[in-house]
Amino acid sequence: MGEKTGQTYILDALKEVPKYIRWCTPSVLPNQKRITDVYSTDVSVSAHFFGSYVDNTGIFKKAHERAARVYGADKTLFTVNGTTGSNFIVMRMISLENDTPQILVTRNIHHSILHAAEWLGVRFRFIKCAYDPQFESLIPPKPDDVIDTLNNYPETNAIIISSPTYNGLVARIRDITRAVKNFDKEIKVIVDEAWGAHIHFSDSLPESAMDAGADIAVQSTHKEGGSLQQTGMIHWKEKYVDSDLMYAAFREYVTTSPSYHLLASLDAVCAYMERNGKKVVENMLKKAQYLKDLLGEKVIPPMKILDDSLELDLVMDYISGYDKAKTVIALTKFKETGFEVADILAKKYRIVVEKSGLNTLLLLTTFQIKDEDVEKTVDAILKIMRRLTKTNKKELIPNPFKHVENKPVIEPYVARRVAQTIGRKVPLRDAIGKIAAEHIEVYPPGIPVILEGFRITQDNVKYLLTVKEMGGHISARDPTLDTIYVL
Ligand SMILES: Cc1ncc(COP(=O)(O)O)c(C=O)c1O
């Protein structure tokens, strides 16, 4: 009803995009080489003389080799299903290498790693992470936390650390790698560096995972690295990684008809960053600093930002530094949530933030942000702030993951498999203490709160219900949270 024949929903919506100020991914380089006509240059593997992406030959091999050089790796592969796809490839490599594969993962891990592990029968155990409720921030583990967990699970094949975290905290990868290799040099250190494609190029940011000695790093180049949506890279060092197995896992997973445009955008980023990476990242960081300075001048206090030195001091033992492209604002002194403020910013001022939460807003400075965008945004935040309700007793939701055990009661793939037969649906409130047979998360950030096979805790439920009530996005079979499958 009321629809015109031939209407194009997605195409029409995209026309609106340039009208927004976007403090969110993708961070697109303004001056790299670009494809100008997408349709006339769309080509497939039938043009065999270009070589094959899947088999890493021809122009693709050359581009991969240059990428490895530019990002400080021994080997690199481009991926076109984001870090989600890269995580599946890396997990497949682990499963090809080990009879009874087992990994340790930090609690702030992205769902793609857990899903890949479940698909491939890789057992995972959690390394606990501290949590800061004011900034809704999971904090990376210290090297000792990793080793403590390894002592409980010495048969581990790899540890996977998420760093930088969504909020920009960079783990102590060098120290963690050293500690893990002292424990057992065959254990791989894998870094989900989805948020770190830019950090290798800057002297004022912490070391990238490759520079800090990790074995494997996966990056979403589209997030902060400059390429088109969907694109990412897998980097590795050959000392402890079997390249043949990585290529085998890649061949099994990747599409046989990749978009060469996506691959070309990665190639163009490498060419550009090789010559200009340092300059362009420093310029972007200047804009981020301008935002922090203006916020400091006009709106802080009563708002707070995470990379204020006083706030960062509290987590110094856990991190090697901070991704200054991120600006996380806490609204602790106001009754309103980050969801509400983000909504006003989008609807009234056409400003899109990367992420909002119960108490926070996350602004990601991208390569394309201009000084005037910074000024307009701070003015908008100031105007909104004047209408917010001050409070001294906002309830901050404590660590929703605190009581989740390191290991499941039933292996997740078993819990999922039997969910339809012996599982039953109950209201979420009645599920506390029961074993979950499905998965619920808040998106973003995409970190599972309830996981199949794990016992559901009161903290899990309280957090999910609060987020839902306050207008956050729940990703689940039943996003109303009326029901959940339990065993
Ligand atoms: C830590 C982490 N890993 C992986 C991903 C998935 O990345 P992509 O969207 O490139 O698939 C995300 C997405 O936000 C993430 O935050």
Image: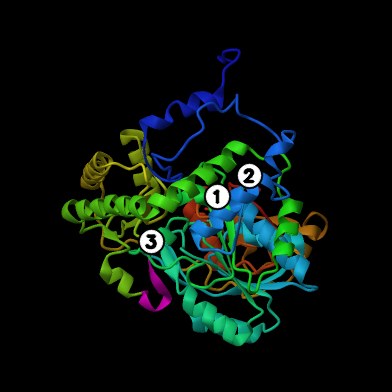
N-terminal label among 1 and 3: 3
Residue type pointed to by label 1? Ile
In this picture, is 157 found above or below 381?
below
Seen from the viewer's position, the closer of residues 199 and 431 is 199
Q: Where residue 22 appears, x then y in whole percent?
A: 38, 41
Front: mark 2 or 1: 2
Residue under label 1, please give it.
Answer: 474
Residue under label 2, please give it.
Answer: 59
Front: mark 3 or 2: 2
* Outermost residue to the left: 297
The crowd level at tag 1 (other Cα within 10 Å; few <14, some 14-19, many 20+) is many
Q: Residue at x 24, y 43 (%)?
A: 371
Q: Could you tell me if residue 104 is visible in this image?
A: yes
Residue type pointed to by label 2? Ile
N-terminal label among 2 and 1: 2
Q: Where residue 186 appears, x then y in whole percent?
A: 66, 79
Q: Which residues are magenta?
A: 315-323
Q: Where residue 61 appears, x then y in whole percent?
A: 64, 50
Q: Could you tell me if residue 482 is visible in this image?
A: no
* Residue at mark 1 to residue at mark 3: CA–CA distance: 27 Å
